[in-house]
């Protein structure tokens, strides 16, 4: 209790005259509780425990700094005194009164000085019939001792005891002192205030609160440890997957690619019912113009240093193995080309439908279209299989004419088909099939006539076209010689276009259809006409408006358009001129 008069503070007992820290204890509940709720809502119970402990720590820092400010202000507090007796007389009486408390009383600069631990309190008279108790501390201890809350409590307790006795000693009339004091206050205060085993002066109430706080902290620590142990255990498995790379992208890790492509990513580890180590990834992306949450599970053989994919779903709907393969290919393709559109533009219902039921079953049996733990999901220890390729990175960079020129005919043929083999394509040519079967990374699961060109990225398409243009012999994918009918593609610096050559069975007329755009997407062009003349693989086609296109067929797999009418596209359309490479033969069957 305290009674603050105009001049200063009048103490009526040895009880602490203030406790500015008690009101701040609510901050632990508010900040810790808010952190726990936020963590649980956003990421589950474990995150809630982490944010709870962070919240408690942050509030402790705030409270400690407030205690430091309050602690410093204690130096300037004034206390009332009825008569300022001499310092010498006051010193003698304080020695007798305070020694039972274990406080050391001596003189400093002719003023009574009370020492407790590393804190020294002086009793100094003021001119306005008050006294102050400025405290000081060892400089080294002040800068390196961060127990400001405890120091504040101890200093207030000592000042209350010393101040109360100074006021009693300086009182002129004992009866007046007794009237303003509570009965047996001195005895009660001695019972209430004592030096505990650790040497800290504190009240019973404070000690009880401190004990309760220690119990709460201990319980939270136990919960945190129990919760965090599985997290640390699972982190090594999560890091194992995140730091691994697929054979096709040996310089890109799953962690880099997945966290770049997806939003709101989460990784977690758990044991399956079969006691398998599972790392599950989830994240948001755009699929068919809608936001979806993709979930992909990796089944680990940690001791063997390998893993394979398991469940893959979108918004909880399971997907087949082809979709698993397609999304992983898309993720790494996007990252390698630094295009973070987060669009699954190459995955569609049509793509999935291009695989027959037999092929789909084969895909599901192999978990990821032929990518198994033994040869494809590799860590740094077994990712050095680049020597098994003619060109190991033809899927991630555009090839130059200089390096292609150094390849032999056989190497050109194999390098071209490596691009398709990476995606699990089988080959009609027995020698090619035997060659790729000998490679540890190859798993052929898709029949040649069921292979979807959409699985190739733009770099792969361009490289396949360039390699094929330098190849003097027939190469895979195989097309029938002399059969012009089919679909073709052209991808150049300025143009992306598709060409289709067909026929009208009723009129027995060959027809051609072209559609394309400038590579910057600024302008588009289209042509649909009939072939009106042909001479030794040179053809001329005319549309309904009289626009003319002349083109040359090499007899196997490419068409060169040498000139075309400038009116076929928009203002900035570069025209259809260029080399078009065959992607698919049209069937001989005419309905």
Image (cartoon, grey):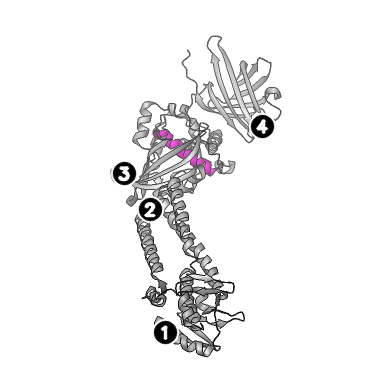
Q: Earlier in the sequence, mark 4 or mark 1?
A: 1
As helix, strand or loop, the secondary structure at mark 3 comes to loop
Q: CA distance from mark 4 to mark 2?
A: 51 Å
Q: Earlier in the sequence, mark 4 or mark 2?
A: 2
Q: Residues within 10 Å of mark 3 (few under 14, many from 20)?
A: few
Q: Which residue is mark 3?
A: 272
Q: Is residue 58 above or below residue 375?
A: below
Whether residue 379 is visible, yes or no, is no
Q: Residue furthest left?
A: 274
CB atoms of marks 3 and 1 within 8 Å: no
Residue appearing at x 58%, y 17% in the figure? 511
As helix, strand or loop, the secondary structure at mark 2 comes to helix
Q: Residues within 10 Å of mark 4 (few under 14, many from 20)?
A: few
Q: Which residue is mark 1?
A: 99
Magenta: main secondary structure: helix
Residue 522 marker: 4
Residue appearing at x 59%, y 30% in the figure? 490
Q: CA distance from mark 3 to mark 1?
A: 68 Å
Q: Which residue is mark 2?
A: 231
Q: CA distance from mark 3 to mark 2?
A: 16 Å
Q: CA distance from mark 4 to mark 1?
A: 93 Å
Q: Residues within 10 Å of mark 2 (few under 14, many from 20)?
A: some
Residue 311: image x %, image y %?
37, 38
Q: CA distance from mark 3 to mark 4?
A: 51 Å
Indicate left or right for 87 with 363 as reference. right
CB atoms of marks 3 and 2 within 8 Å: no
Whether residue 331 is visible, yes or no, is yes
Q: Nearer the viewer, residue 377 or 48?
A: 48
Q: Earlier in the sequence, mark 3 or mark 4?
A: 3
Q: Earlier in the sequence, mark 3 or mark 2?
A: 2
Magenta span covers which residues? Answer: 319-337
Number of callouts in the render? 4
């Amino acid at each position: 209790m305290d009674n603050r008069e105009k001049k200063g503070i009048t103490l009526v007992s040895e009880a602490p005259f203030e406790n500015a820290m008690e009101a701040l204890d609510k901050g632990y509940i508010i900040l810790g509780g808010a952190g726990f709720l936020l963590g649980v809502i956003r990421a589950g119970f474990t995150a809630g425990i982490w944010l709870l402990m962070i919240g408690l720590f942050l509030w402790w820092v705030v409270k400690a700094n407030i205690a430091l400010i309050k602690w410093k202000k204690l130096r300037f507090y004034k206390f009332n005194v009825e008569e300022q007796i001499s310092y010498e007389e006051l010193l003698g009486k304080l020695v007798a009164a305070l020694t039972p408390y274990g406080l050391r009383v001596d003189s400093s600069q002719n003023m009574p000085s009370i020492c407790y631990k590393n804190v020294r309190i002086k009793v100094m008279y003021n001119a306005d019939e008050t006294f102050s108790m400025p405290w000081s501390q060892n400089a080294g201890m002040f800068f390196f001792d961060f127990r400001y809350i405890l120091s504040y409590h101890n200093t207030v307790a000592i000042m209350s005891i010393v101040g109360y006795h100074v006021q009693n000693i300086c009182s002129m009339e004992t009866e007046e002192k007794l009237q303003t004091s509570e009965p047996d206050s001195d005895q009660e205060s001695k019972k209430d205030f004592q030096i505990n085993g650790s040497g800290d002066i504190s009240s019973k109430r404070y000690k009880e609160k401190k004990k309760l706080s220690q119990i709460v902290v201990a319980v939270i620590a136990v919960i945190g440890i129990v919760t965090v142990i599985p997290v640390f255990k699972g982190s090594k498995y999560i890091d194992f997957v995140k730091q691994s790379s697929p054979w096709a992208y040996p310089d890109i890790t799953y962690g880099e690619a997945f966290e770049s492509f997806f939003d709101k990513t989460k990784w977690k580890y758990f044991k399956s019912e079969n006691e398998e180590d599972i790392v599950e990834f989830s994240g948001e992306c755009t699929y068919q113009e809608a936001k979806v949450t993709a979930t992909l599970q990796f089944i680990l053989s940690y001791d063997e240093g390998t893993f394979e994919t398991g469940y893959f779903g979108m918004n909880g709907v399971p997907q087949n193995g082809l979709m698993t393969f397609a999304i992983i290919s898309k993720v790494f393709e996007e990252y390698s080309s630094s295009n973070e559109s987060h669009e699954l533009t190459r995955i569609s219902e049509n793509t999935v439908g291009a695989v027959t039921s037999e092929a789909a079953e084969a895909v599901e049996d192999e978990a990821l279209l032929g990518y198994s733990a033994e040869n494809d999901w590799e860590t740094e220890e077994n990712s050095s299989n680049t020597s098994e390729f003619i060109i190991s990175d033809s899927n991630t960079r555009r090839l130059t004419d200089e390096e292609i020129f150094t390849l032999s005919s056989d190497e050109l043929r194999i390098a071209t088909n490596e691009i398709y083999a990476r995606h699990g394509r089988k080959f009609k040519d027995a020698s090619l099939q035997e060659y790729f079967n000998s490679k540890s990374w190859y798993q052929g699961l898709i029949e040649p006539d069921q292979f979807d060109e959409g699985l190739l990225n733009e770099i792969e398409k361009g490289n396949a076209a360039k390699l094929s243009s330098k190849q003097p012999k027939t190469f895979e994918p195989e097309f029938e010689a002399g059969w012009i009918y089919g679909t073709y593609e052209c991808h150049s610096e300025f143009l992306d276009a598709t060409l289709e050559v067909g026929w009208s069975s009723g009129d027995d007329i060959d027809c051609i259809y072209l559609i394309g755009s400038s590579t910057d997407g600024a302008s588009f062009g289209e042509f649909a006409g009939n072939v009106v003349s042909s001479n030794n693989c040179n053809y001329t086609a005319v549309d309904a408006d009289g626009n003319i296109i002349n083109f040359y067929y090499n007899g196997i797999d490419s068409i060169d358009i040498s000139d075309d009418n400038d009116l076929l596209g928009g203002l900035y359309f570069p025209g259809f001129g260029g080399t078009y490479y065959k992607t698919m033969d049209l069937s001989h069957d005419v309905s």
